[in-house]
Image (tube, rainbow, N blue to C red):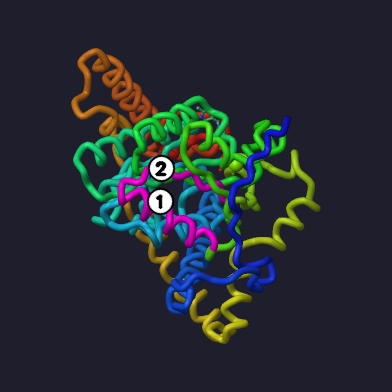
Amino acid sequence: MSNRIDLPYTRFLDPEGRLVGELPAWADDFNLLSELYRRMVLTRLFDQKAVALQRTGRIGTYAPTLGQEAIGVAIGSLMRDEDVLVPYYRDTAVQLMRGVRMEEILLYWGGDERGSDFQDPRSKEDFPICVPIATQALHACGVATAIKIRGQHRAVVTTCGDGATSKGDFLEALNVAGAWQLPVVFVVNNNQWAISVPRRIQSGAPTLAQKAIGAGFHGEQVDGNDVLAVYDRVQWALDRARHGKGPILLECLSYRLGDHTTADDATRYRSAEEVKAAWLEEPIKRMQAFLAGNRVWDEGREQALIADCQRQVQAAVDNFESAGVQPVEAVLDHVYARWPAALGEQREMLLERVARREESSPGAARHPLPQAVEGDRMCSSSSGGHHD
Ligand SMILES: Cc1ncc(C[n+]2csc(CCOP(=O)(O)OP(=O)(O)O)c2C)c(N)n1
Ligand SMILES: [Mg+2]
């Protein structure tokens, strides 16, 4: 018996940036299309800088978004201020589009809680980055339930990776979203790898989108390297969700061109040929070729854009580096609204330990990075100090 369910797959641009389908009317707006391109380039340059900062020991760990910029940029440009983002750790692009500052993203990955205290009003109600795999999908359903009870026209977007779709949390979230017809859009960033586990052995389902069918709602596949395709389907899904028409699952097919995180070495488990082939499909070159073919992009604009992005990134790095280090106990400050008395002893122990270290080597206890860069172990905390 077949386990294949025919689901829509959307792609407008092929890897050379040529049209392979008729573009929807919204795509007549070349200012919008150029802006999507600009944002992808900004994301990539920031991403490169974040990796470099980790390599020089200035942040703890970082999960590069290299090759997956189209997914986040499309989502972020379509979400309205009143919508809510419930992200995972590979969402630099969406977060930047939601007004999260680059220095906040760097603070987060440096293990500083201020990185999750977003200052821009657009992201005030967005959730912080979630590291425990797939748990955010359930949080998103909680938010969507509140929105539904209040009768508001808002949507929740939650993102996750291909590997996350194997988790019980993800499947439970799909179930409740379908049962209660919640205003939530699940975007699966299928980058073909869950650390060292390839997609082909991750799940017996031919597509990840079809997991929605079992929960009673619609799922589709999208070319996640085609920003126009992602934009089109996310727009549709958000519109439906805001109008009370229930959840949607979008599986965006892409590729993780970089290491899983800066604590990983992907050359140990995948071939150079595979990565080389994936580079031919990446989202930025194809959009650039499309814009250039339509005479709205050229080398002069490209150079000006790169210079402008580099200026923005450097300004953010300067802000990050002058932010100063927080006291050690700040890691506890946002765990509970009110610190439970039962945990008081542990808090005291931490403070005493820090005081002892401070006595034996002044200044050492205030510098968080030596432990942070050492480990590539898993940490289930939501903080970016160190995790894989
Ligand atoms: C509950 C839980 N189990 C295990 C891990 C360790 N871990 C970190 S990332 C990852 C793989 C996730 O892969 P995928 O969902 O495809 O997302 P990607 O990193 O590829 O974007 C795992 C198993 C974790 N963070 N949380
Ligand atoms: Mg993955």
At horizontal 63% and vertical 49% (from top left) the residue drawn is 256
- The reply to whether residue 70 is visible in this rendering is yes
- The reply to whether residue 388 is visible in this rendering is no
* Rendered location of residue 332, percent (x, y): 30, 29
Q: Nearer the viewer, residue 259 or 354?
A: 259
Question: Was residue 249 drawn as part of the magenta stretch in this picture?
Answer: yes
- Residue tagged 2: 247
Q: In which quadrant of this rendering is ligand 2 seen? A: top right
Question: Was residue 228 drawn as part of the magenta stretch in this picture?
Answer: no
**Mark in the foreground, 2 or 1:** 2
In the rendered structure, the answer to whether residue 206 lies left or right of residue 162 reads right
In the rendered structure, the answer to whether residue 319 lies left or right of residue 45 reads left
In the rendered structure, the answer to whether residue 61 lies left or right of residue 17 reads left
State whether residue 295 is above or below residue 23: below
The first of marks 2 and 1 along the sequence is 1
Instruction: Quadrant for the N terminus, please.
Output: top right
Give how far apart the Cα atoms at labels 2 and 1 are.
29 Å
Residue lying farthest to the front in this orientation: 1
* Rendered location of residue 147, percent (x, y): 25, 41
Q: Nearer the viewer, residue 183 or 118?
A: 183
* Rendered location of residue 311, percent (x, y): 43, 71
State whether residue 272 is above or below residue 303: above
Report the magenta residues as a range: 229-252
At horizontal 31% and vertical 51% (from top left) the residue drawn is 243
Q: Residue 355 falls in which quadrant of the image?
A: top left
- Residue tagged 1: 105
